[in-house]
Amino acid sequence: AQSVTQLGSHVSVSEGALVLLRCNYSSSVPPYLFWYVQYPNQGLQLLLKYTSAATLVKGINGFEAEFKKSETSFHLTKPSAHMSDAAEYFCAVSENAGNMLTFGGGTRLMVKP
Amino acid sequence: EAQVTQNPRYLITVTGKKLTVTCSQNMNHEYMSWYRQDPGLGLRQIYYSMNVEVTDKGDVPEGYKVSRKEKRNFPLILESPSPNQTSLYFCASSLFVGGASEQYFGPGTRLTVT
């Protein structure tokens, strides 16, 4: 069975500061990993995904994530936070056998001016 | 515009009154699914469908039904809603069946059962 843990349900950073959102997963097979973002009153939008190609994955809006198999981690980073990055972020894992996404509990990112 | 649509967006109902939430996608996607989102729990899958007339249970199927009579539509049915089904519901679709396939989400339906 697969599972996802997101450390920190709320993260607060200052505008211009580094954003680091943590995600650890467990999976019995090599996984596919995703980061989604949810803005208020909207559905989820894909930020980036890892599908066993390069371990450093670049996504939209300046975000990137690094797959570390030894640490079973897929942390999301952005060098400089913008006010528009304030949202909830979800890490998710999927196995090859099907499309079912298992989500972490989410991290709400707040950006202070 | 390629999208997943859901209706209604907001719904308040009473215990036991049957309801249907519709979901439609215009991208000719094979795979469709329903999730519910609850604070601190992320999204959990209710049901999914890999093709027309093929549906299967996700992690939390109790109290829900689905059908897939046409490729574009995947309605979620609550035969006898209860207060513990108060939640935010999302429909999603993806082009093909397989773990690498990105899922596209609808805007969500906020359901309150009193």
Image (cartoon, helix red, strand yellow):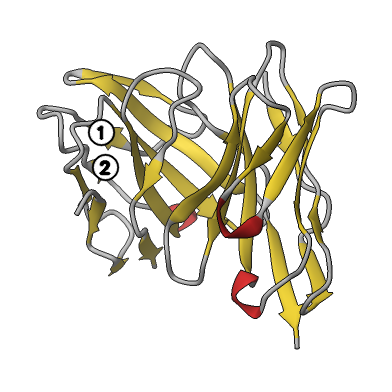
Q: Which residue is mark 1?
A: B66
Dot 1 amino acid type:
Val
* Chain containing the residue with disc 2: B
Q: Looking at the image, which residue sits at the far bottom?
A: A113
Q: CA distance from mark 2 to mark 1?
A: 5 Å
Residue B31 x, y percent position in the rendering: 31, 27
* Chain containing the residue with disc 1: B
Residue nearer the viewer, B63 or B89 = B89
Question: From the viewer's perspective, is residue B81 above or below residue A10?
Answer: above
Q: Tell me the tag on residue B41.
A: none
* For residue B61, side relative to residue A26 (left or right): left
Residue at position x 43%, y 27% in the image: B101
Residue B25 x, y percent position in the rendering: 20, 43
Q: Which residue is mark 2?
A: B76
Residue B23 x, y percent position in the rendering: 22, 47
Residue at position x 20%, y 30% in the image: B67
Residue at position x 18%, y 28% in the image: B68
Dot 2 amino acid type:
Leu
Of the two numbered discs 2 and 1 on the same chain, state the one appearing first in sequence: 1
The image quadrant that residue B6 belongs to is bottom left
| Mark 1 crowd level (few <14, some 14–19, many ≥20, 10 Å Cα) | many
Q: Looking at the image, which residue sits at the far right?
A: A70
- Labels 2 & 1 near each other (Cβ < 8 A): yes
